[in-house]
């Protein structure tokens, strides 16, 4: 098997795993079900993943990497810190809405423990990214001076709160426009009269 074929097979397995986990939940899904859905032998599946937990954690990593890539490409095109923050918030909330099925499975069946180290590193990278946006806004005089780390934590917490709210009520989603307006009105510098 060549490297390209292996990568394509792994992606096919992850897509099939998403469908199986979404339909049956984590606990009721099996490696056999995922192998069948991905049209690969059970032995072939075990060449890529040690077990169901390994497959699920890989799937979470894949989603986090996809989100980070989507975010990075979009943010690279924006220079204005206000628009950069709006873009960050919009992509974060919209991506969550689009891929909420895995969040629901993880939250309802698995709690928040599976893949803790991966999530911790992911959230640290997100924290740094938001800090950089805020810092550039302060330097450019668009955002008022503030404790950058704390402001970034507040923004990240608002977004995580949005994500966690899905666990309890799927339609508890708010718009990224309103979220952006609320956050940015607290960050944008107001001229004194």
Image (cartoon, rainbow, N blue to C red):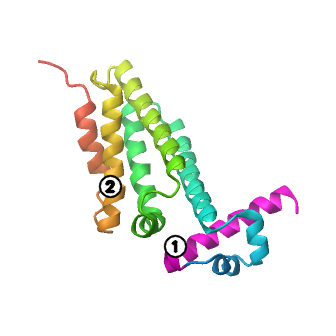
Q: Position of residue 122 (x, y in %)?
A: 51, 44
- Mark 2 neighbour class, 10 Å CA radius: few under 14, some 14 to 19, many 20 or more: many
Secondary element type, mark 2: helix
- Please name the residue shown 63% across and 73% down the image: 16
Q: Nearer the viewer, residue 32 or 122?
A: 32
Q: Position of residue 30 (x, y in %)?
A: 61, 78
Look at the picture and state if 59 lies above or below 189: below
Q: Nearer the viewer, residue 42 or 82?
A: 42
Q: In this rendering, does residue 132 appear at all?
A: yes
Secondary element type, mark 1: helix
Q: Which residue is labeled 2 in the image?
A: 162
Look at the picture and state if 113 lies above or below 83: below
- Please name the residue shown 39% across and 24% down the image: 135
Q: Nearer the viewer, residue 111 or 18?
A: 111
Closest to the camera, between mark 1 and mark 2, is 1
Which quarter of the figure has residue 152?
top left
Magenta residues (range)? 1-28
User: Is residue 24 located in the magenta-colored stretch of the structure?
Assistant: yes
Q: Position of residue 168 (x, y in %)?
A: 30, 67
Which quarter of the figure has residue 131?
top left
Look at the picture and state if 12 lies above or below 93: below
Marks 1/2 in contact by CB < 8 Å: the verdict is: no
User: Is residue 189 located in the magenta-colored stretch of the structure?
Assistant: no
Q: Which residue is labeled 1 in the image?
A: 26
- Please name the residue shown 56% across and 43% down the image: 73
| C-alpha gap between disc 1 and disc 2 | 22 Å
């Amino acid at each position: 098997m060549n490297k390209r074929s292996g990568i394509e097979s792994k992606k096919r397995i992850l897509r099939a795993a998403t469908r199986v986990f979404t339909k049956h939940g984590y606990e009721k899904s099996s490696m056999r079900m995922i192998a069948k859905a991905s049209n690969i032998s059970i032995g072939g599946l075990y060449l890529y993943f040690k077990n169901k937990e390994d497959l699920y954690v890989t799937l979470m990593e894949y989603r986090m990497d996809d989100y980070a890539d989507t975010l990075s490409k979009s943010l690279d095109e924006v220079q204005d810190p206000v628009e950069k923050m709006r873009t960050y918030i919009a992509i974060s909330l919209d991506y969550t809405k689009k891929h909420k099925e895995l969040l629901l499975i993880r939250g309802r069946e698995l709690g928040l423990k599976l893949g803790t180290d991966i999530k911790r590193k992911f959230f640290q990278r997100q924290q740094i990214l938001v800090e950089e946006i805020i810092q550039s806004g302060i330097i450019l005089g668009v955002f008022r001076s503030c404790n950058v780390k704390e402001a970034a934590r507040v923004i990240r917490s608002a977004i995580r709160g949005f994500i966690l709210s899905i666990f309890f009520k799927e339609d508890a989603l708010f718009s990224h426009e309103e979220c952006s307006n609320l956050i940015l009105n607290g960050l944008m510098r107001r001229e004194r009269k």
